[in-house]
């Protein structure tokens, strides 16, 4: 097993006006999320979110951060959300094992000492996408089966944005300190995940795009201030950090899916500032 966590710093809107393509990707893109037998994480200074992939194969894996965070164990002052996008597996939380099939999620509260990730079949490993945010209070651990996710249909075919938002960790159905997390699936024939674009200066967000084929498909994630936009082209199973001051929307050459995760000042999913199309540059 290898373990890797990289750090990405926060940025002023003025900074990215001067970034070329390579620099923009270096600062905001996580190019590899899942590697068999490994844990790959990014620690962003935007609200101190940690996100990445845990891919157990023939041996269980555990995120063992302490020195990096100045604590005794990873979740001493953090909460954790996760969604499995791979094969069947399980997680063991302080000795209690829970099966995790494809698209199942889980919320793990502050103070949990051990979260161990396993795959049932090393040849078809589970792929746990994990997101952790700082916490101030312990809320109950909760399994979040895909079948129970709160489904919110959005968009229409005329605007090429017909999609379903599956809310896993959402204030309308459970308590957390600040983490929100979900899974959005675009229908065939749709390519825009959000347009018109919006911002929510109260919360930052990360996006992990997946469920599209390579090498003939790309998703383009748009970020930046509304009048100074930039884009990042993504392969399957890559993620981007989106600062709170930035727009966030994307378009693909076919339909796709993505996992979004937010944290910040509030947990009001609909708290957003719409950007008129006429203001985009």
Image (cartoon, helix red, strand yellow):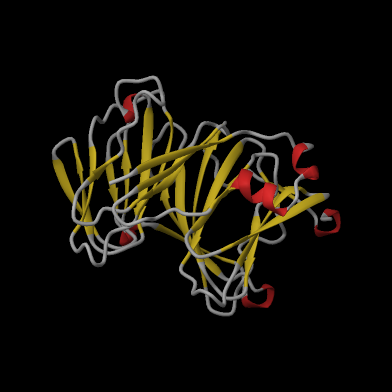
Query: Which residue is at the front of the view, 224 or 269?
Result: 224
Residue depicted at 36% across the width and 38% down the height? 80
Q: Could one spot residue 171 in this view of the protein? A: no
Q: Could one spot residue 132 in this view of the protein? A: yes
Count of numbered labels shown in the rendering? 0
**Vertical placement of 138 versus 230: above or below?**
above
Residue 10 placement, left or right of 117: right
Query: Which residue is at the front of the view, 272 or 3?
Result: 3
Residue depicted at 60% across the width and 63% down the height? 193
Q: Quadrant of residue 108?
A: top left
Q: Position of residue 149 (x, y in %)?
A: 37, 57
Residue depicted at 23% across the width and 34% down the height? 114
**Vertical placement of 171 versus 54: above or below?**
above
Residue depicted at 75% across the width and 46% down the height? 19
Q: Quadrant of residue 253?
A: bottom right
Q: Position of residue 278 (x, y in %)?
A: 86, 58
Q: Position of residue 245 (x, y in %)?
A: 70, 39
Q: Position of residue 84 (x, y in %)?
A: 33, 56
Image quarter in which the C terminus is found: bottom right
Residue 202 placement, left or right of 177: right
């Amino acid at each position: 097993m290898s373990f890797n966590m990289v750090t990405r710093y926060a940025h002023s809107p003025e900074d990215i006006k001067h970034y070329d393509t390579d620099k923009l990707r270096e600062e905001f893109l996580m190019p590899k999320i899942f590697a068999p037998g490994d844990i790959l994480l990014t620690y962003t200074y935007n609200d101190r979110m940690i996100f990445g992939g845990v891919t157990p194969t023939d041996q269980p894996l555990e995120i063992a951060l302490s020195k990096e965070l100045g604590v005794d164990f990873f979740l001493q002052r953090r909460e954790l959300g996760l969604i499995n996008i791979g094969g069947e597996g399980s997680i063991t939380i302080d000795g209690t094992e829970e099966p995790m099939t494809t698209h199942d999620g889980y919320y793990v509260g502050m103070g949990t000492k051990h979260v161990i990730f396993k795959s049932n079949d090393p040849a078809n490993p589970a792929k746990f996408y994990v997101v952790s945010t700082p916490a101030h209070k312990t809320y109950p651990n909760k399994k979040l089966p895909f079948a129970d996710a709160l489904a919110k249909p959005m968009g229409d075919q005329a605007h090429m944005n017909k999609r379903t938002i599956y809310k896993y960790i959402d204030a309308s159905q459970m308590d957390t300190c600040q983490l929100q997390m979900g899974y959005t699936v675009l229908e065939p024939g749709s390519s825009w995940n959000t347009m018109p674009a919006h911002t929510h200066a109260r919360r930052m967000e990360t996006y992990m795009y997946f469920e599209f084929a390579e090498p003939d498909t790309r998703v383009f994630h748009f970020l930046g201030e509304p009048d100074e936009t930039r884009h990042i082209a993504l392969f399957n199973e890559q993620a981007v950090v989106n600062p709170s001051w930035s727009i966030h929307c994307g378009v693909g050459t076919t339909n796709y899916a993505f996992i979004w995760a937010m944290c910040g000042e509030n947990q009001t999913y609909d708290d957003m500032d719409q950007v008129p199309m006429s203001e985009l540059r």
